Image (cartoon, helix red, strand yellow):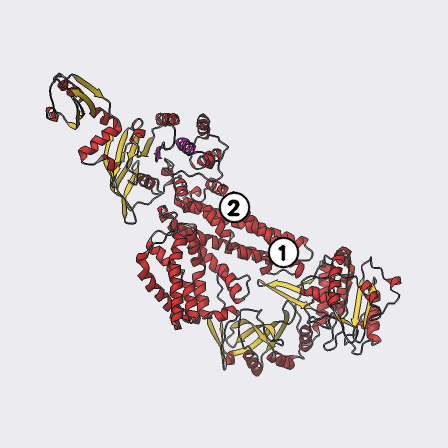
Amino acid sequence: MSLTQLFNFKFFVQNLKKSKALIILTSLLLPVFTFLGLSLFGQVSGIVDFWQVGLFNMLFMYIIPVVLSISLFNFVFKKKSCDFIMGMPLSRKTIFLTNTIGGILLIVLIQIITALLTALFSIFASGAIIFSSVIFDTFLFFTVSYIFVFVACNLAISFSGNIFATLVSLLLILFLVPFSLLYSRIGNFDIVSSSEVKVDIDNNEIDFYEPFNFTAPSMAFESLFLGTYFGYNGMSIVKMVGLCIVYFGLGLVLFNRKRFEMAEESYESTKIHLIIKLLTLAPFVAFFCSTGAYRSSIGWLFFIAVLATYYYVFDLITNKKISLKITIPLFLVSTLTMIALYHFIIPKLDILSKKSIKIEDVKCVEVDSIRTYGNYYNDLGLIIDDEELVGDLLRDCSEFHNYSPYIESSYTDFNCNLNIELENGTHYLVNKWIGRSLEKAIKKYGDNVYQYDEIESLPQLIGVDLNREDRNNIRNSLREDLNNMSYKNYYEMIKSGTEGYTLILANYKNHKLIASDYSYIGLINTSKLVADLLNKQAYTSVYGIYSLDIYKKDDLQSYMIKVNPDIKFADLEELKYENKIKEAKTTNDDIISGDNDFKGEFDLFKDISYDYAETSFGVIDRATEAISKEDLIEFVNKDKKAIFNREEPYLVLSGYGNKTFLYYTNNIEEFYKLMAKTYNEKIYPNESSFKLNENIQ
Amino acid sequence: MIKITDLSKSFGDKKVLENLNCNIKTGSIYGLIGANGAGKSTLLRIIMGIFKEDSGTIELDEEIIKDKEELMQKLVFVPDDLFFFKNYTLKDTINFYANVYNEFESDRAIKFAETLKLPLEKKINNFSKGMKRQAALICAICTNADYMFFDETFDGIDPVVRNYLKKIIAEQMDKKETTIIMTSHNLRELEDICDNIGLLYKGGILFESEIDSLKTNMFKIQISLPREFSDKDFENFNVLSFKKSGSVATLILKGDKEKYEKELSEMNPIILDFLPLTLEEIFIYQMEVLGYEFNTVI
């Protein structure tokens, strides 16, 4: 076989040229939207995960490869164009191979452009941090996914006669098997809607399901309906590559045999048309079985009415004519067979992915990481090997789902990644919400020293450019702060963290983003270091506001460092703040308070809390605000005019316990001195356990 | 040479071609006629590999075509229902042909287009029906393919342009030994250009002949004798048709013209005129001989 039989470049160029507008438009969609999406995510979170880089990739996975495939092969849908193209001196093999290879090259090109744009964004956008491995994983995963959908669509085209028939065939190729497997596990649609998977814990045995590792298009739908995590999946890539090879070969054979006389009609024969039509009944039948409609005569009547309508509508859509009356009895018999299949056989297939663990076979459980109230998981690494505690912990897994880390749970439960090790050395990684049993474990193992091991992680301060030295300093400082900490203290620290994180330690390992957010409680060295960095970079900040919050567990004490470098932005936000102030009410303590859930944290500065919930930060001229409420607020630095210049970068320190105070300064040293003074002079009835003055000299 | 053996093709329950056998000589223009739905276009599409035959074989120069690109380079097809890429100009289309046909002559195609006053830069989809067909025909001719298949060749083309196109088809045949198969349901359209003609009826070639021999073998006479006469007076002749109006009879005879002329002269006719037969008339009478009503065949 000559190279031109594999790929006829001239034909490909001509074929592209005929649909150039559509193809160019489709090809631009992904890079443009990805770039816009990154701009958005970069602003909000700073660290951009796989799904954020790949969000538009995921959405366009259902559009771009399909449009590309249909554009390249659109001649097969019209008799006239079939005459023209198939009458050219090009073998069917050449046409199929050229379009397939060319389409794949185009997809790779689109993905390369998208990856390069993402990389450029990560370099030039100071607010966003995107690991190069995330970009590569996204590129690899979605390139394979797009090629998979493209090749599947080519296969659908090779046996379909018009666009509707092609789309129906494509949906069946992509989703019929995953749909049936999901149905086997879920069993009924009530569970689908609540995005949970039922798990039975029967005495000393835990049943759970292994992930399906579907192909990307099905995985995205699984994620949509079940709330499962959509991310890089190596097994899925292997599956897609394997299926691509099979679909490609099958498509080539079918295209070689294709009868182009069926152009504009649905399929080559009535038999194939009927089989496809029956297979498309799967969702109806599944719904019928799962809702229990078959138990009532009204259910049956409704189902028959739907089927009767569908029977003709399908023909009308795919064939533009209603025919096949002769097939009605066969259709009915086959539908009943499908009902039996979905009612009796498919639900039993869940056994294929069901796993059982006997609690006595568990050697130990490592609570690998834990997510409290922040956005990310904090490393924990607590190994529980006590037989009773292991049993408690596993039984505490009342809904043992290894799927979704985002399922609502009780307030006291935290989402944990568990690594269960069996006596025989087998490991299972599961994600669980745990509460009571974890507290028990912390009591037992709490005095052990927490092992900090985040050397490879990349510290990130949102909106702040950190150089290598800064990062090293933060890592060292964190190590110093964390290394001597007991599990108990560490656990308390991350438990009392807030969503208003400041410092994130991020890493992308084994195709997963691992990030911890720290709120500085107990991080004495790190707090100081971060404050220095913030102050230094006041003008370089994109969004210009940072807070350093120090809390005590029971009686809130809040210190905020705020850097305001951007007056224009502040002007805009000021209006917003003013509006909120009007809605606020005055408490008995004469402290302005809002009615948000974080009462106490941001009583005076509730605009921060409010803005955070709105996913944007506000910058407010607090000096003016404070002066207008002088009777309510004690200014620590009364002589503010002498030492505070609002035109320069400045720090605002606020605190409130019995009485609110504000402190403004352009000088970091003064800030430290004040903090030291604050604690030493015991302004607040509940003294902080953190002796900052020892570190600020 | 194209050799078609036992070719059959059905669409569902409808048999379009049934055990069709046909040989088309190299370097000839073969006219394929038949009523609408007789299977002319289907036959061409099967030869081109667009449609798949149910059974039978098609050999091109003793080789079965079956998706062989080197053989496909020898074929070009202009279908009855023309297709051009949306937004393509004639220049783009010429470029497309040049990219897929190894021997395509772009300059010649442009020259033809200029002669025919076909705008090169205008989108073909805005052309009139006749202009589209002219564009398709000149592109096909310039491929220099050995075998050209033209379905409803001159449909929608005015007589002046039709003559010009016939001229360039003739030139092409002089230039290269080209075999052309033309289909039409209009016999008059084919009679002055085809060497051979075949009539497709009920899935097979009902009648096939060289046009020259048909024309020299059959002739029409008008005769009036100095006495009363009837068809019995011509029993010794191979009379395909006899019609008498008053004292003048019109006969269609098949056979040796010189011999008949001599024998008829011996009858001392008052009038004896030999008139030319159109191809359509030849077919009408030939079909009647074969027992078919011409109007039902074409």
Would you place residue A414 above or below residue B187 in this image?
below
- Label 1, label 2: how many angstroms apart (C-alpha)? 25 Å
Residue A89 location in percent, x, y? Answer: 39, 39
Q: Are marks 1 and 2 on the same chain?
A: yes
Residue at x-position 36% and y-position 33%: B155
Q: Residue furthest front?
A: B246
- Asked if residue A46 shows in the view, the reply is no
Would you place residue A222 above or below residue B53 in this image?
below
Name the image quarter holding residue A183: bottom left
Query: Dots 1 and 2: beta carbons under 8 Å?
Result: no
Name the image quarter holding residue A301: bottom left
Foreground: B6 or A606? Answer: A606
* Mark count: 2
| Local crowd size for mark 1, using a 10 Å CA cut-off: few (<14), some (14–19), many (≥20) | many
Would you place residue A9 above or below residue A57 in this image?
above
Secondary structure of the residue carrying numbered label 2: helix
Q: Could you tell me which quadrant the N terminus of chain A lies in? A: top left
Secondary structure of the residue carrying numbered label 1: helix
User: Where does label 2 land, which residue?
Assistant: A22
User: Where does label 1 land, which residue?
Assistant: A38
**Subunit that carries the residue with mark 2:** A
Residue A499 location in percent, x, y? Answer: 67, 68
| Local crowd size for mark 2, using a 10 Å CA cut-off: few (<14), some (14–19), many (≥20) | some
As for residue A40 lying within the magenta part, the answer is no
